[in-house]
Amino acid sequence: MSNFATTLHIRDHCLCLHTQRAARALARRFDAVFRPLGITSGQFSLLNALNRPSPAPMVQVAALLAMDRTTLTAALKPLERQGLALSHPNPQDRRARLLVLTDAGRALLARATPLWVAEHAQVEATLATPEALRQGLRQLS
């Protein structure tokens, strides 16, 4: 059994805990920025993942966002209800789905992006080495 000193060590050194806490804090911060547009930070990321010249295979979007397909399907539903994204069978493989950003989704993304740029610049300004952090996070994922 671990003693309290071990618990304190884990609290102070656990990369998983610190990453989870930072992710939640960043999500709350960006959720507040996007709230006037009616989207969350996760929805902004999903809209960005769909912003491509041709329909995106669901498996590629899921991999980009580090989600399983079930979670991605659930995240996509509110965007579909709002008319921001569409999902349809892939004509080459009817078992697979293609995801599309609608014109309304593109318009919302165009309004949201400057908000992201401004908030992201503020977040980066608080970090001594934002690129080193990005590189480290890429290595972990």
Image (cartoon, rainbow, N blue to C red):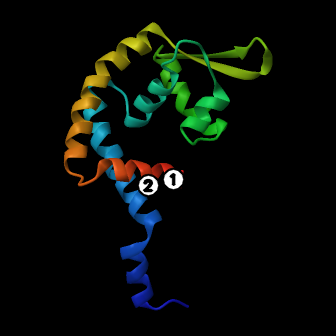
Question: Which mark identifies residue 6?
Answer: none
Look at the picture and state if 81 lies above or below 122.
Answer: above
* Residue type highlighted by circle 1: Gln
Look at the picture and state if 5 lies above or below 43.
Answer: below
Q: Which residue lies furthest to the top in this view?
A: 103
Determine the CA span between mark 1 and mark 2. Answer: 5 Å
Look at the picture and state if 9 lies above or below 102.
Answer: below
* Res 12 → quadrant: bottom left
* Residue type highlighted by circle 2: Gly
Please name the residue shown 57% across and 42% down the image.
66
Is 19 displayed left or right of 112 in the figure? Answer: right
Q: How far across and down, in percent of the image, does residue 72 sit? A: 59, 34
Q: How far across and down, in percent of the image, does residue 92 sit? A: 79, 14
**Residue sitting nearer the eye, 118 or 25:** 118
Q: How far across and down, in percent of the image, does residue 77 sit? A: 55, 26
SS type, badge 1? helix
Query: Where does label 2 land, which residue?
Result: 136
Please name the residue shown 27% across and 38% down the image.
120
Please name the residue shown 41% across and 89% down the image.
4
Q: How far across and down, in percent of the image, does residue 50 sit? A: 51, 22
Q: Are marks 1 and 2 in contact (CB under 8 Å)?
A: yes
The image quadrant where one finds the N terminus is bottom right
Is 88 displayed left or right of 35 in the figure? Answer: right
Question: Which mark identifies residue 139?
Answer: 1
Q: Residues within 10 Å of mark 1 (few under 14, many from 20)?
A: few
Look at the picture and state if 6 lies above or below 24.
Answer: below
**Residue sitting nearer the eye, 119 or 28:** 119
Q: How crowded is mark 2: few (under 14 residues within 10 Å), some or many (20 or more)?
A: few
SS type, badge 2? helix
Is 118 displayed left or right of 30 in the figure? Answer: left
**Residue sitting nearer the eye, 77 or 132:** 132
Please name the residue shown 20% across and 41% down the image.
122
